[in-house]
Amino acid sequence: MIGTGLIGTSVALALRENGVRTYLHDRDPAAAATAAARGAGVLGLPSSMVDLAVIAVPPSSIAAVLAECQANGLARCYTDVGSAKTEPLAEAEATGCDLTSYVGGHPMAGGERSGPVAATADLFRDRTWALTPLTCTRADALRSVMDFVGMTGARPLLMTHVDHDRIVARTSHVPHLVASALAASLAGADASVLRLCGAGVKDATRIAAGDVALWTDILRANATEVSKILSEIATDLASVAHSLQSDPGEVAGLLRRGNSGRALLIGEPAGVGNG
């Protein structure tokens, strides 16, 4: 396990529950030591080649770490858990990495808290885990990564790098920015404002507590797709802002589309639970 933050340590804890011998390495020795103290695995790099190396670092570091691991013969197969796939792949190709042994990955799980102390072995249970193999990916590498994902309790979903980045821009990256923008509007709020903040605003801003450096890295790595979705939402909001007093139908239309999207998200007919 290269990287022992929330995701890396949670992966290691899940593997340990399945009896897998896991090694822990992080550029921050204290983080790796904390993960080891929590029972996530053995502190340090293995002395011989292992079956799989999981690279749990920010997107901008994936290619460099993959190249270093492969140069040192660390593992037979490699995967990562990065939230953006296209840019790290391009960097890995440019660096000369062996892509036949590599399968890009991204678990759709996480939390607003970060670091190994926030990790849990069940973080990925029943969650989707996107995998982005290439046409050149070896069959044994894909099988190894699929088996690994299964041991975490997640459900693997195969897709292309391009499709992954296009979809998560809408389902993960832009929601984080929108939550942050809403939370930022409360920065410096006085006690009277905060006392009138109910569960709705707290739920809508929960993910805004995420790690700033990590999320800056993620958003930069998927900037093109994120910008497209942000522009769509900005157009909707600007239209409603213009129409609030003059055209209630415009407002109602956005609210109805919101009802429909929420219903699809939670698997309920539109309108259920809105009373």
Image (spheres, rainbow, N blue to C red):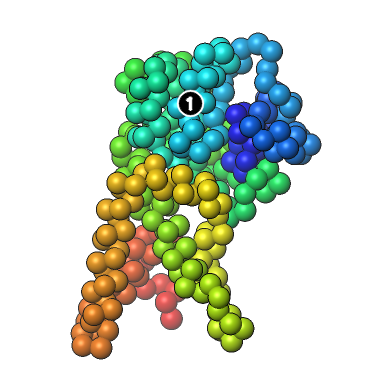
x 54%, y 19%: residue: 69
Going by the image, does 63 lie left or right of 121? Answer: left
Position of the N terminus, as image quadrant, is: top right
Residue 94 sits above or below residue 110 on the image? above
- Residue 262 vs residue 227, the one in the foreground: 227
Packing grade of label 1 (10 A; few <14, some 14-19, many >=20) is some
Going by the image, does 249 lie left or right of 165? Answer: left
Residue 28 sits above or below residue 68 on the image? below
Q: How many marks?
A: 1
Q: Residue furthest right?
A: 37
> Where, by quadrant of the figure, is residue 21 drawn?
top right
In the picture of the structure, the residue carrying the numbered disc 1 is 64
x 67%, y 21%: residue: 45
Residue 20 sits above or below residue 154 on the image? above
Label 1 SS: helix
x 57%, y 38%: residue: 153
Residue 11 at what x, y percent from top left? 61, 36
Q: Is residue 158 visible?
A: no
Residue type at the position of mark 1: Ala
Residue 84 at what x, y percent from top left? 41, 40
x 71%, y 46%: residue: 117
Q: Is residue 111 visible?
A: yes
- Residue 205 vs residue 220, the one in the foreground: 220
Position of the C terminus, as image quadrant, is: bottom left
Going by the image, does 120 lie left or right of 256? Answer: right
Residue 247 at what x, y percent from top left? 20, 85
Residue 54 at what x, y percent from top left? 56, 28
